[in-house]
Image (tube, helix red, strand yellow):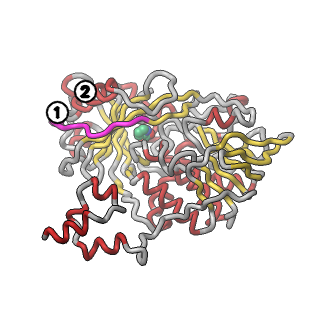
Amino acid sequence: MDPGRTKLIMRTTALGDFCSEGRLFEMPYRLLRFLVARKYPEARMFRQPDRLRKSYDAVIIGGGGHGLATAYHLARDHNFTNVAVLEKGYLGGGNTGRNTAIVRSNYLTPEGVAFYDRSLKLFQQLSEDVNLNLFYSERGHFTLAHTDSTLRTMRWRAEVNKHMGVRSEVVDRAEIRRLCPYIDLDCGGVQPIVGALYHPPGAVIRHDAVAWGYAKEADRRGVEIHQQTRVTGIEVAGDQVRGVHTDRGFIETSKVLSAVAGYTPRITEMVGIRTPIVIQPLQACVTEPLKPWLDNIIVSANLHVYISQSSRGELVMGASLDPYEVHSERSTLDFVEGLASHTLELFPFLSGVNVNRQWAGMSDMTPDYSPIMGRTPIRGFYLDTGWGTWGFKATAVCGETLAYTMVHDAEHELIRPFRLSRFQNYQLVGEKGAASVGH
Ligand code: PYC
């Protein structure tokens, strides 16, 4: 590049991030002028309204995937558009951007399988629905068994899955080796693999783009998305919701959905409801990018590790929940040490690979490892919580079923088993055996 052009580019100060990444110098001026020209501003994905209205037909607390998907389905399926999504931080900054982007439906209970199967089907068509490439990539999902008792649970899951029309089967070592040739089936002699549950439709999808896609399409239909807007209270008269207090003023509304993770008890105490949720951190990390070598998603609940390779080549990895209640998104060295040692039992050739980033999310754990969704004793106050370690994969179906539930004030049939009242009626939906994560 000639020095004259360099100076011209350097004087352009509106491009802080771009400059700091050093990418500015790679861009010819004939392109750069479009970036800075007011005449051709980059299209925004969604508006940023500068004030709240006095009232909305519904308010959704939480601008993660679940809240935004619900807003999208309210607008698209029910023409219910006078809706505000309130997010205390930025869109997808909670667990939507902190998971390992896996979607699957190989659950243990018929209720769980039906619910997640619908989600997978919605995810498969989501790029087209929201007109954004979400990099949906079907990989095949292995849940490895290292003991006979785990294999028994896999058989049970496979039978329930098949009965519900979901593709899953138990496979032996030879089949695992055929589909994932790099795995050390003996795990260095520590815990040899005896078989696996194989679920061909298991996939990954770019998680933050899922939130952006829903936000874009909800906004296009008239929903308002308010970031940096914190809910400070919920007004209830008798047993009916009347409005929401925020740090930007009061909003009247008769329908409120709480779709937050990690903060559910803060919200439910505003309306005087208790849930059995306990909050534990779940951590994950990515390595530096590698050439593509891992097609599948590999999970071992015994070794406490799950791993897939992103389209950028990074290995995306996670482990079990931290074994204590703490409300924090800080990651720990302890986690990455444990994860690395277990990953190397499966793939010893990775010993020279660097971990680039790690992070934590807060998981709302319920006693039966199933979510809490639907109506509550407060009329007009709906819950979408208790996602434990598998909330991302439910994003799509939550949007569809909660929008239905809010409009009709009656639970959609797919979420009826997950009502809060099940803890009073002892109608638990035990999904612990379907965890990818050791608990
Ligand atoms: O349930 O598939 C899962 C999962 C992956 C990471 C955490 N949970």
State left or right for residue 208 relative to residue 114: left
State left or right for residue 265 relative to residue 46: right
Q: Nearer the viewer, residue 61 or 377?
A: 61
State left or right for residue 203 relative to residue 343: right
Asked whether 1 falls inside the magenta stretch, the response is no
* Dot 2 crowding, Cα within 10 Å, few <14, some 14–19, many 20+: some
Residue 171 image position (x, y, % from top left):
32, 40
**Residue 89 is at least partly visible in this image:** yes
| CB contact under 8 Å: marks 2 and 1 | no
State left or right for residue 126 relative to residue 235: left
Q: Quadrant of the C terminus?
A: top left
Residue depicted at 35% across the width and 70% down the height: 35
Q: Nearer the viewer, residue 119 or 6?
A: 6
Residue 172 in the image: above or below residue 218: above
In the drawing, what numbered circle is on residue 341? 2
Quarter of the displayed picture in which ligand 1 can be seen: top left
Q: Quadrant of the N terminus?
A: bottom left
Name the residue type under label 2.
Ser
Name the residue type under label 1.
Ser
Residue 315 in the image: above or below residue 193: below
What residue does disc 1 label? Answer: 351
Cα separation between marks 2 and 1: 9 Å
Magenta range is: 348-360
Residue depicted at 36% across the width and 62% down the height: 14
Asked whether 350 falls inside the magenta stretch, the response is yes
**Residue 156 is at least partly visible in this image:** no
Residue depicted at 30% across the width and 25% down the height: 338
Label 2 residue SS: helix
Residue depicted at 42% across the width and 42% down the height: 99
Query: Would the CB of label 1 be found within 8 Å of ligand 1?
Result: no
